[in-house]
Image (spheres, rainbow, N blue to C red):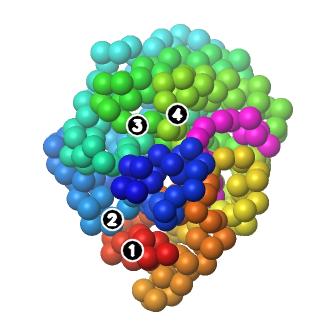
Amino acid sequence: MNKRERVAAAFRGEETDRVPVCMWKHVPPAYWADDDRFAEYQARFYRSTDVDFMKLSGDKYFGWPSPALDGIEKAEELFRLEPLGPLHPYIRGQIERTRKVVKALGKDCVTLYLIFVPLSCIRLKIGYPRMMKLIRENPEAMKYACGVVAEDLKLLVRGVIEDAGADGIFYSVQNGEENRFTAEEYRDWVKPGDQAVLDYANSLSAMNAIHFCAWEEIPNRLSVWEDYRAAVVSWSRYFDIMDIQKAKEHFGCTVWGGFDNRPGSFLYTASKEEIERETARLIEQGGRKGFILGADCSIHDELPEERIRWVAQAARRL
């Protein structure tokens, strides 16, 4: 199998010749102003680490940039929001940059573009304290706002898949921490926006992944996402479900994870030989069917890329 064949088989839940490996980093701000340099950075990372596919970064475009969110204090003001539309730089800029990244990576590399859920797009603009104040003040207003953002995200999803050539999306689902909302609140206030974008993405591609992000290192209330569906689930092994086989059973699809991504953890401190042994142990747990080896979330800049390559090369020998 080549890399594309291997990854496609893993997404379909089929047995692979070896377990695919994918870890990712954010792109440093020094590369954000120039799309060509941004694309070159991601292509260089792919070659340097020898991972099997790429989760494409959305750096520079975090946060839904509507000026109507600036200075908003009352939840009722959220009812004034309108979609940015297909020609807005927030939409077109991400599509055009993704086109360059996909071209730089080449046709053999499967690519998934990062999309945050609507509530997170708002939070990344106004911050957690104000987000929580507004949603508790008037949940219906925030639901409306998430619906508006979802319309823009659907434009973005279609653009990165159909125009830019990405294979699917990496849908980062957040805000499900056990201490943030009750299950009933989440399903009523947050889920409609989440689901609108996910359902649309699944109508365009069978190669989407959901990332159940353990934001702020607090366990997630996984029950609120039990009917979220995609080909692959990227989960936080060190906060939610430690056992890989249990994760496969729980999510009912191919799972992606294994290593702790936090600075100071094993991946950052262990010797090459120790990392190779841990890679073998994780692959033995996960098997060659329904498992992709990765990490809980983004790898931090301080981790030398050669350590990711050690994992990829060790997996190749197994």
Which residue was labeled with disc 3? 167
Type of amino acid under label 2 = Asp
Identify residue for label 2: 50
Q: Which residue is mark 1?
A: 313
The residue at which mark 4 appears reads as: 206
Q: Nearer the viewer, residue 18 or 302?
A: 18
Please state the horizontal and vertical placement of residue 39, each as a whole percent of the image.
Answer: 22, 46
Q: Earlier in the sequence, mark 4 or mark 1?
A: 4
Query: Which residues lie in the magenta part?
Result: 223-236
Q: Residue at x 45, y 54 (%)?
A: 6
**The disc labelled 1 sits on which kind of residue?**
Gln
Are there few (<14), some (14-19), or many (20+) residues within 10 Å of tag 2?
some
How far apart are the two marked residues, 2 and 3, measured between alpha carbons? 19 Å
Q: CA distance from mark 2 to mark 1?
A: 8 Å
Query: Disc 4 residue type?
Result: Ala
| Crowd rating for badge 4 (residues with CA inside 10 Å; few <14, some 14–19, many 20+) | some
Above or below: residue 68 compared with residue 166: above
Measured Cα–Cα span from mark 2 to mark 4: 24 Å
